[in-house]
Amino acid sequence: MNALLSLDDTGITPDEIRSRRDGTLEPVSFATVNTTAERVEKSDILERLTQWREEDNLIGANRGGRPKKMTDLAVLTGFLLLAKEKAPLYETALAQLFQYRLDENSLARLGLKPYPSTVPDHAAENRWRGNVDYTFKSILALMDPYPYSRRRTLTFTQVKSVLANHDSVQEARRKARLDEFTNRFLHMTYMLQNRATRRAAGTMDISIDQTAISPINKRGWHDKYIDSNIADEQASSIGTTRRGVVEVFAGFYPEKSSTRPDLKPGATAKESESAAKATKADLAWLWTANIAVRVNPKPDKTSGFPHLIMGGTLSLPNIGVSEEAVKIMSQLVHNGHKPGMVDADQGYFAHARPERLHDPTERLGFKPSTEYRKDKLGVQGGAAGADQIEGHHYCPAMGKELKEATIDYQNGDIDLDTYRKRIQTRIKYRLRAKEKPDHNGNTKMLCPAAGKSPTMTCPLKQLHPDAADIARPEIDEKNLPEHPDRVCTKTCVTIKRTDGLRYKQALEFGSEEWYAFHKHARNSIEGVNSYLKDDGKEQIDSTKRRLVRGFAAAQFFLTVLMVNYNIRTLAAFVHDQVKDGTYGQEHEPVDREKRTPSWLHRAFHNAYIGKDGTGHTEEDILRFNALPLRT
């Protein structure tokens, strides 16, 4: 190839020949390389990769195989550099980066050495590519929950064999590593913010959602039909079998359905293929990215921080949706963040089982903000005689027009202004906490007509002698229960932590405050999903930018691109603050409480249109015309 570079009878430049016209050979400065390498090191992932190799007995004097000539630092830094340039995340592009675009100082910073000038370009090219491939695959192998050969498409007979030989224990261990890999990098980007920006709110409030990620090969399989598929294969003559499966561990995803199944982890494709009753045309063989974005708890005020991606995982569609959300919230708590509100669409809290999502969410300290299913509005059980209505316990003598305010509004029987007034009025009928929850999370609650600060008067309760002499709404005697329960006969009652757990919300459902936060949170996550998939930005769903097969590779590149998004977003935020003259100013935190101990920080385990950015008006949302569940 050296001879080719001296040709003078062609209009193609030497750099174009070297790069095969696939990309730029412009040098990358040492400063850029050093900054990116420092960020990789700050994530502490290099130490974890070494530990995982030790755990897997891949390090030691008696281990065979050729030694690595490429460092983990070089591969991770190189891919982040390519992502910054919006370049394809190809191994060939990475090899060209090392061979042609970094000087000796930059290579040395990454633990690499250039090949001597006596080695021809084509030989050096092959060596760089081989070293990149070897080290990159060794990193993926440590974190691959679904290891098997993807060199060729598989017959259905081979698919069944892969499933039969799958190690679920190994899957759980490596999936945990893969999620930690992502978590460490995202937390690193959060720590790039200055102290004032990190502390701009007293809590970590997030909006969480799923978005589809396409594998390179989109042909799937179904457990219900695999045996008949195998029989067809065996009956077919050689050379007539259909194109086979590559990604055995993916799933059918109902792209246009308004509901999303949430099967328990370990469910098979048989159970997940069309649980949403989507038409066959709506189904695609995909993975799902679970993404959490930091949002402003007081959207009517300037947040003082950028909306960074705080958590992310990759999962099989329709399976473990709740568990993936809990995993992200748990990572945030372990990273030292004080839990705040977690906003989600109806695919989460509205449909999930309490033991899988609501209970662990509350135990972690997060408080939901969400919509309800239509059949979960109005009175939904209760405790001690109090009615549970849309997240709170109320006096049972509250009028029907207040109990069913949301139902009446959805049915079109009242307008928005009347609805909001009823929501505000019924707050006075709500039970009030007498004291903080006990160690089990149970709370003593006062009847609204009891205590020193009653909000109502009731024929069944004598006004406390120390209560202020002011006018209060009176409970209509005709609404009193025929057989009063404890809430009517006692001053206070105990509401257990699990009472109404499925319906608990951080804010008064239907109120202006709830709508403002929910709209802001949904806009934020949908906007991030849109930016991540934008062809001019991260392109996370474009298989043309990541040509490596497999689940682990998909999450690896998703991580790289989310890190690039966060750094790009933070840079834009700082740019605007410097321009406005507000950079470095302390923002008064919202509801700041005692900060989480610092030692926890080291613990690890728009394309949309419309007034609210989703194509829906305020009334649409309150009437629960389905918001988009995915992008």
Image: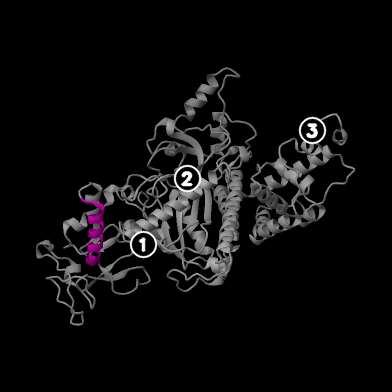
Of 361 and 108, nearer the camera is 108
Q: Is residue 378 visible?
A: no
- Give the residue displayed 29% in from the left and 48% down from the top: 623
Q: Which residue is mark 1?
A: 506
Q: Is residue 431 left or right of residue 369?
A: left
Q: Is residue 438 visible?
A: yes
Q: Secondary structure at mark 2?
A: loop
Kind of residue at badge 2: Gly
Tell me where the magenta segment starts and ends, as one range.
414-430
Q: Which mark is residue 12?
A: 3
Q: CA distance from mark 1 to mark 2?
A: 32 Å
Please tell me how crowded label 3 is: few (under 14), some (14-19), or many (20+) other residues with Cα within 10 Å: few
Q: Which residue is mark 2?
A: 266
Quadrant containing the N terminus in the rendered view: top right
Residue 125 picture location, percent across and down: 79, 40
Number of marks? 3
